[in-house]
Amino acid sequence: MILYPAIDLKNGQCVRVLHGDLDTATVFNNSPADQARAWADGGFHWIHVVDLNGAVSGQAVNAAAVEQILGAVSIPVQLGGGIRSMADIEGWIEAGVSRVILGTVAVREPEIVKQAAREWPEQIAVSVDVRKGKVAVQGWTEDSDLDAITVARRFEDAGVGALIVTDIDRDGTVMGFNVEAFGEIADAVAIPVIAAGGLASVADIVNLKARKGVPVAGAVLGRALYNGAITADEALKAAG
């Protein structure tokens, strides 16, 4: 299982928020590049970056911070938030992003996702952000009428590298993973699933790995990693 320590960007700073609400932001590092180096030095093999302002506005807001992260580490970076067009995707891949995450367009303009996945195989991920059973868009400020599996199945055989499934109701709460919810989606599609939202302890990683059925391919680590409830060493050991 691959672990993805998260760097959520708001106004150029590395923050954590509750349920995606930017007004609840807690700043953990004024230098996203330093935070990225810390995760790389901790032994992680990927970094998960989200431009929170961009996700809401629909265009890159924290581009400078993302570029600093890309310049600071040699491990691959996946990036989401405000990426809405083929030009946006191409720009970030040329800048050095290893995988671009598309959320709002996956609901509203799925053909862009399919076209991008044809153009850059395995370098496109779909973000499936679930609140009370429905997929949210526009930086989680709006709800669609689609469930997670309906959205996920749109991209079967499209060449998408991963589905990043976020449990918004648990995001930032450190309540623990809803293992079965992630597993249900992993069982439903052939695309690898990365779980996000609510990780509280090493037990969440252990339980995710132990679940019967199609293995969940990865997990995003957020607040529990920042507040010390879980360390890089024990998380990576549990992930195997």
Image: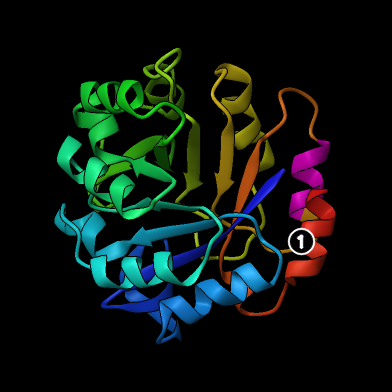
In magenta, the rendered stretch is 204-210
Above or below, comparing residue 206 to residue 27 in the picture: above
Give percent across and percent down for residue 67: 32, 67
Q: Is residue 200 left or right of residue 147?
A: right
The local secondary structure at tag 1 comes to helix
Examine the image and state in which quarter residue 186 appears.
top right
The kind of residue tagged 1 is Ala
| Near-viewer residue (68 or 136) | 68
At horizontal 74% and vertical 42% (from top left) the residue drawn is 208
Give percent across and percent down for residue 219: 62, 49
For disc 1, the neighbor class at 10 Å (few under 14, some 14 to 19, many from 20) is many
Residue 62 visible at all: no
Above or below, comparing residue 49 to residue 13 in the picture: above
Q: Is residue 67 left or right of residue 176?
A: left
Above or below, comparing residue 74 to residue 214 in the picture: below
Examine the image and state in which quarter residue 175 appears.
bottom right
The chief SS type of the magenta part is helix
- In magenta segment, residue 209: yes
| Near-viewer residue (221 or 48) | 48
User: Which residue ends up furthest to the top in the rendered image?
Assistant: 157
Give percent across and percent down for residue 62: 25, 68
Above or below, comparing residue 211 to residue 76 in the picture: above
Q: Is residue 215 left or right of residue 196?
A: right
| Near-viewer residue (198 or 111) | 111
Residue on which disc 1 sits = 235
| Near-viewer residue (200 or 194) | 194
Say which quadrant the N terminus sits in: top right
- In magenta segment, residue 58: no
At horizontal 24% and vertical 41% (from top left) the residue drawn is 90
